[in-house]
Image (cartoon, rainbow, N blue to C red):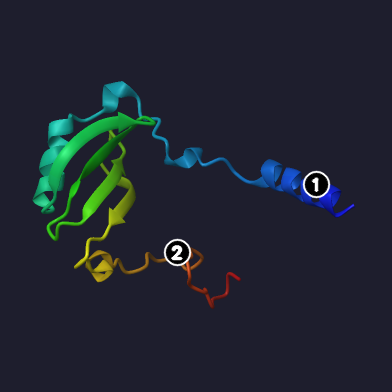
Amino acid sequence: MSLFRLLAALAVLAINCPAHADTDCADPISDWKPREVLRQQVEARGWTVQRIKVDDGCYEVRGTDQHGNRVKAKYGPATLRMRSLEIDFGERGDPSDYFCPPRPGAEHIRTPGTVNKGKNQ
């Protein structure tokens, strides 16, 4: 009977869990800005660009930051606003270089390994 309950619970989770399509971009191609503009923006931040490609309708930038950490970021092609960022910190990498103060109203957002002790629990 426990196998049945496990399968039922997994089915409920599969139905209720949202798809991860929110990382895809849906900007019309006519509104896209050139990749070279994005390259200049990223290089002004101190990154070295190795590749810019289109992935899931977004621009995906791969390269290294000013500290030598490998970075992979997705940008909306019409706005050139960052949508996601992955950092592979090297031996001397320091995550505090990427600290961003919380946005107002974002108290409900949790990061892995933290506990949110606010009114939104």
The kind of residue on which mark 1 rests is Ala
Task: Say if 41 sits above or below 29 in the image.
Answer: below
As helix, strand or loop, the secondary structure at mark 1 comes to helix
Q: Which residue is drawn at 10% across and 53% down?
A: 46
Q: Residue at x 26, y 60 (%)?
A: 89
Task: Indicate the position of residue 27 as horizontal and vertical percent values.
Answer: 36, 30
Q: Which quadrant of the structure image shows residue 50?
A: top left
Task: Indicate the position of residue 29 as horizontal and vertical percent values.
Answer: 31, 22
| Residue 79 visible in the current orientation | no
- Which quadrant is home to the C terminus? bottom right
Identify the residue at the far bottom of this view: 117
Q: Which residue is drawn at 45% across and 64% down?
A: 106
- Considering only order in the chain, which callout, 1 or 2, is on the residue closer to the N terminus? 1
Estimate how packed mark 1 is, as few (under 14), some (14 to 19) or many (20 or more) residues with alpha carbons within 10 Å.
few
Task: Indicate the position of residue 109 as horizontal and vertical percent values.
Answer: 48, 63
The kind of residue on which mark 2 rests is Ala
Q: Is residue 55 left or right of residue 119?
A: left
> How many numbered marks are there?
2
Task: Indicate the position of residue 86 as horizontal and vertical percent values.
Answer: 32, 52
Task: Say if 75 sits above or below 29 in the image.
Answer: below
Which callout, 2 or 1, points to the residue nearer the camera? 1
| Residue identifier under label 1 | 8
As helix, strand or loop, the secondary structure at mark 2 comes to loop
Q: Residue at x 18, y 31 (%)?
A: 35
Identify the residue at the far right of this view: 1
| Residue identifier under label 2 | 106
Q: Is residue 47 left or right of residue 116?
A: left
- Between residue 59 and residue 1, name the one nearer to us: 1
